[in-house]
Image (cartoon, grey):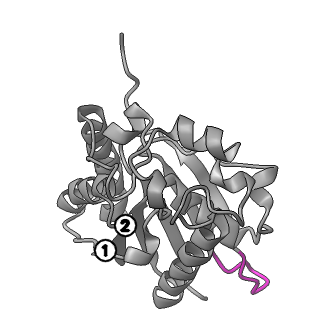
Amino acid sequence: MTPTTELVIARHGEAACNVAGIVGGELGCTGLTDLGRNQAEQLAARLASEHANRPYAAFYATPRLRVTQTAGIIAQALHLPPTIDPDLRGPDHGDADGQPWVEVKTSFQGPPQHAPDRQYAYGSETWNEYLDRATAALQKILARHDGERILIAAHGETVEAAHSLLLKLPRNAGLRLGFVTDHASIARWQRPTNRFGRIIWQLVSHNDTRHLQPRHG
């Protein structure tokens, strides 16, 4: 029987750029908030519990500061250092980096997904250019770790890319659907072999935040 491949994508904890509504590229991202670090610690505890039962064979992370900080907390809990994959980075924002998202979206008349073949700022990737890069990186990782458990610390956009890849969504899917992905949430895909010998990808969970304690006050 072919071993089950499992892909787990954990979004980073809350970042200062998220709170401020700032486009968080290389310039705009200044790292996690105190709440974001707490979320990452709770996420890491859950992943460490899973890792103890069936270890992750590989751990990847994207290079942006809020993700590397989240990945560092996870790595300490799992005793598994991450491999930084630059091709998994979030979209390249060009001149929008560090600017208020409300101004960028107002000028563009919506989020990048709503005109996926147009740049939303000078020097930015289009949404489809981002998806092409991210899905290619995900395909390489899945091929490299066939039959293994894979953990990726990343962005909400990475979750969108994985769903687009494995659901085989059309390139203009963002015009009619989207995915809500909370901070420190988990998305989980599995590819088992059924009793008829068929191998299919199954979306086990999306936006799973059961490990996070509710905020009070």
Q: Nearer the viewer, residue 24 or 61?
A: 24
- Left or right of 210? Residue 53 is left
Q: Is residue 205 visible?
A: yes
Q: Relative to residue 182, is residue 84 depicted above or below?
A: below
- Left or right of 130? Residue 87 is left
Magenta-highlighted residues: 191-200
Q: Which residue is mark 2?
A: 62
Q: Please state, as top left, top right, bottom left or bottom right, where the C terminus lies in the image.
A: top left
Q: What SS does tag 2 mark?
A: loop
Q: Is residue 54 magenta?
A: no
Mark 2 residue crowding within 10 angstroms, few (<14) / some (14–19) / many (20+): many
Q: Relative to residue 140, is residue 120 depicted above or below?
A: above
Q: Relative to residue 122, is residue 66 depicted above or below?
A: above
Q: Say if mark 2 contacts mark 1, CB within 8 Å.
A: yes
* Name of the residue lying farthest toward the top: 217
| Residue 145 percent coordinates (x, y) | 46, 85
Q: Nearer the viewer, residue 166 or 132?
A: 132
Amino acid at pointer 2: Thr
Residue 117, located in which quarter of the rendered image? bottom right
Q: State the separation of the CA atoms marked 2 and 1.
A: 6 Å
| Residue 149 percent coordinates (x, y) | 45, 74
- Left or right of 86? Residue 30 is left
Looking at the image, which residue is at 70% across and 49% down?
A: 178
Instruction: In the rendered structure, find residue 84 and report the number of the disc placed on it.
Output: 1
| Residue 187 percent coordinates (x, y) | 54, 55
Q: Is residue 199 magenta?
A: yes
Looking at the image, which residue is at 27% across and 43% down?
A: 32
